[in-house]
Every structure is written in C-alpha cells, then in structure tokens.
Amino acid sequence: MPQIVKMNMEGKETEDITLDETIFNHDINEPLVHKVVTAQMATKRRGTASTKGRSEVRGGGRKPWRQKGTGRARHGSIRSPLWVGGGITFGPKPRSYDKKVSKREKNQALKSILSDKLKTESLIVLDELSFSEIKTKNALELMKNLKIEGKKVIIILPEKDKNIYLSCRNLPEVKTLVIQALNAYDLLDNDYILLSEETVSLIEEVLGKWRILEM
C-alpha cells in the first residue's frame, strides 16, 4: 500500500497515512495521458477562423479581358486565387476541434498522473489547509514552510475557499482548483500538487467509483 508523510502548515511532518493503491499506485499509462491532455487542449480551441473561397468573393462576374490577342495570360475571373483579393485555396473554415475521450479514460489518466506525482515526491498532503484571513503573506509563508517557494504549485481544494483563493491569486506560480474541476492538464502543469487530507479522501471517493470497470 502506498504511503505518504502528512505535514502541517508549519512544514513539520506529523504522521504517515496510507493511500488507496488503485489510485495512487496505478500503472502509469503515458500514451493515455497524452491522449487525454491533447483532447483537453483541443477543446479550448475556438475554431472560428474563416476565409472566403473563390465562390464567396465579391465581383468577377465577367471575364477581365478576352481570351486571345492581348498578349497577357488567360484569366476567367478576378475571383481566382491567383489574383490579389481573390479567393483563398483550401483556407480555414469554422470547425470543431473536439476529440472524443471517455470518462473511463479521463479517470485512468488522472490516476496515472497522481501515481507518478507520488512516485516522484511531487505530492504534498497537509493535515489541514485553511487561512484565517485574506493575505498573500499567508500563502507565501506556507510555500516557504513547505520549501516549495518559487515553484509551480497547484492547490486542490475540497470546495471553494475564498480566503485561500484570494490569498494565492497574486502569486503567478500558484494556482487553486476545486476538486470538481480536477483535470489532467492542470495536474501535469506544475512542480508540486498540494492537497489536504480531506481532499485526498474525496479524490479516493470520486476516482474509486471506477474500480469495478478496471477489473
């Protein structure tokens, strides 16, 4: 069973806790993680780029000059892609970049990332995470106590916490995320993942529902 040393907000070790091995000791599937992250990033693309083809450009209803006798090249319309202001050949059109990824694949990708973070000692679990008031100084002090000051950190919260969110908002290297918005890209895009023991329990509860599908 995977274990991790729980810490307090002063950065001192308190006790070892046992983690769910089906989530934090999952087989690391890099191709699947790549697929899920690529699909997530593709979904963010607006896909609104649009150009006009020769049939959509205004004008060009008549032949610009007669076919022969002028000494110039033959042309049938000023809407041709060969002309400045003409239509665009194979230009972009509005489209969807969405890629299909099943819920099972998303959950397995999350398990792979969490297992890898634990293995590389990039996962930090606190016995409790709360700020009594809104101060950036509180967030800076926490990072300093945990010896991750200046590192890219994502804090996963069990629910919205105004004090924590606003205290971390001015720190460009720190991002807060509620567990409902847990996703593969944000879990990867950091140096450390910071969560409370309560958050760990919720993650095990949510991702543990897929245990039967994997058997």
Image (cartoon, rainbow, N blue to C red):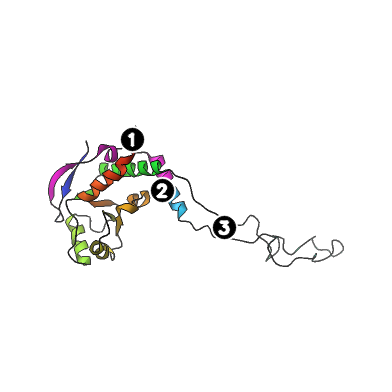
Image marks 3 and 2: residues in contact by CB distance under 8 Å: no
Tell me which residue sits at (41%, 44%) in the image.
Answer: 34
Q: Position of residue 67 (x, y in %)?
A: 84, 61
Alpha carbons under labels 2 and 1: distance apart? 24 Å
Helix, strand or loop at disc 2? Answer: helix
Q: Position of residue 133 (x, y in %)?
A: 19, 66
Alpha carbons under labels 3 and 1: distance apart? 41 Å
Q: Earlier in the sequence, mark 3 or mark 1?
A: 3
Residue 212: give its label.
Answer: 1
Can you tell which quarter of the image residue 210 is in?
top left
Q: Position of residue 190 (x, y in %)?
A: 31, 53
Q: Nearer the viewer, mark 3 or mark 2?
A: 3
Q: Position of residue 213 (x, y in %)?
A: 36, 35
Q: What is the three-letter code of the residue carrying label 2? A: Val
Please state the extent of the stretch shown in magenta in the rendering.
12-38
Q: Nearer the viewer, mark 2 or mark 1?
A: 1
Residue 189 position (above or below residue 120):
below
Residue 94: give its label.
Answer: 3
Depth check: give the residue in front, 127 or 187: 127
